[in-house]
């Protein structure tokens, strides 16, 4: 995957190890963890975070990109396999919320993923993420629920699917 850009200053590039401390800081925000719902048990465990990301970086089956906005690391976007299905996931630092960055990044990322159908998941009350996915062509196809470490309880989620 090469470098991509658009008129709004959003670009995707390969993840660098130097991005990891920024990703870690973005995941420390309590509101972001609440919205994501399905996060690590202890988001403040930097060693566990770095181990997790080093595994991601070494796994050639996972497509991973850093999201840049006007040259700043705004977040990350991934394609991986979960529950036997190809899925996409993204994390945007809270200071970049509400600016269309996630939508723009996902629209740039999707053409790089050749597998369809493609799935995504979002907590039912994460309206912003659901909107991003639907603006990018995903449609709600199922529901699930699971324990959320960030919320300390079971949380319902939508499963969304992109057919083409």
Image (spheres, rainbow, N blue to C red):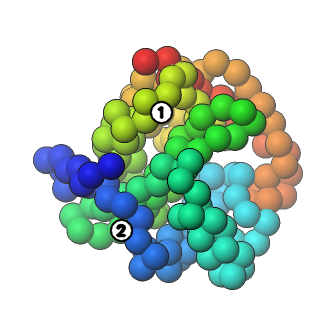
Seen in the picture, residue 89 relative to 25 is either above or below; the reply is above
> Which residue is depicted at the point 63% across and 52% down?
36
The CA distance from mark 1 to mark 2 is: 21 Å
| Res 42 quadrant in image | bottom right
- Disc 2 target residue: 73
Local secondary structure at mark 1? helix
Seen in the picture, residue 73 relative to 127 is either above or below; the reply is below
> Which residue is depicted at the point 34% across and 33% down?
111
| Res 72 quadrant in image | bottom left
Toward the viewer: 156 or 16? 16
Earlier in the chain: of badge 1 and badge 2, it is 2
Say which mark, if any, is on residue 5: none
Q: Quadrant of the C terminus?
A: top left
Label 1 crowding class (10 Å Cα cut-off): few <14, some 14-19, many 20+?
A: many
- Disc 1 target residue: 133
Is residue 124 something one can see in this rendering?
A: no
Is residue 112 something one can see in this rendering?
A: yes
How many numbered marks, from 0 up?
A: 2
Label 2 crowding class (10 Å Cα cut-off): few <14, some 14-19, many 20+?
A: many
Q: Return the x and y of residue 114 as percentages of the image width and height.
A: 43, 30
Q: Return the x and y of residue 7 as percentages of the image width and height.
A: 13, 47
> Which residue is depicted at the point 53% across and 34% down?
130
> Which residue is depicted at the point 80% across and 59% down?
149
Q: Return the x and y of residue 97 as percentages of the image width and height.
A: 41, 55
Q: Residue furthest left?
A: 7
Toward the viewer: 23 or 115? 115
In contact (CB < 8 Å): disc 1 and disc 2: no
The answer to whether 26 appears left or right of 15 in the picture is: right
The answer to whether 144 appears left or right of 35 in the picture is: right
Q: Return the x and y of residue 71 as percentages of the image width and height.
A: 23, 68
| Res 155 quadrant in image | top right
């Amino acid at each position: 995957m090469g470098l991509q850009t658009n008129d709004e200053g959003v670009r995707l590039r390969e993840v660098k190890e130097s991005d990891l401390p920024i990703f870690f800081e973005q995941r420390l925000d309590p509101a972001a963890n609440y919205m994501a719902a399905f996060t690590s048990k202890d988001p403040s465990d930097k060693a566990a975070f770095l181990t997790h990301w080093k595994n991601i970086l070494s796994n050639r089956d996972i497509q991973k990109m850093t999201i840049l906005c006007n040259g700043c690391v705004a977040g990350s976007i991934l394609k991986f396999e979960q529950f036997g299905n190809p899925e996409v996931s993204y994390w945007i630092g809270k200071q970049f919320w509400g600016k269309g960055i996630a939508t723009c990044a996902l629209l740039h990322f999707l053409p790089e993923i050749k597998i369809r159908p493609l799935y995504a998941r979002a907590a039912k009350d994460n309206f912003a993420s659901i909107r991003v996915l639907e603006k990018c062509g995903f449609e709600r196809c199922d529901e699930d629920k699971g324990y959320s470490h960030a919320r300390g309880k079971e949380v319902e989620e939508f499963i969304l699917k992109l057919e083409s």
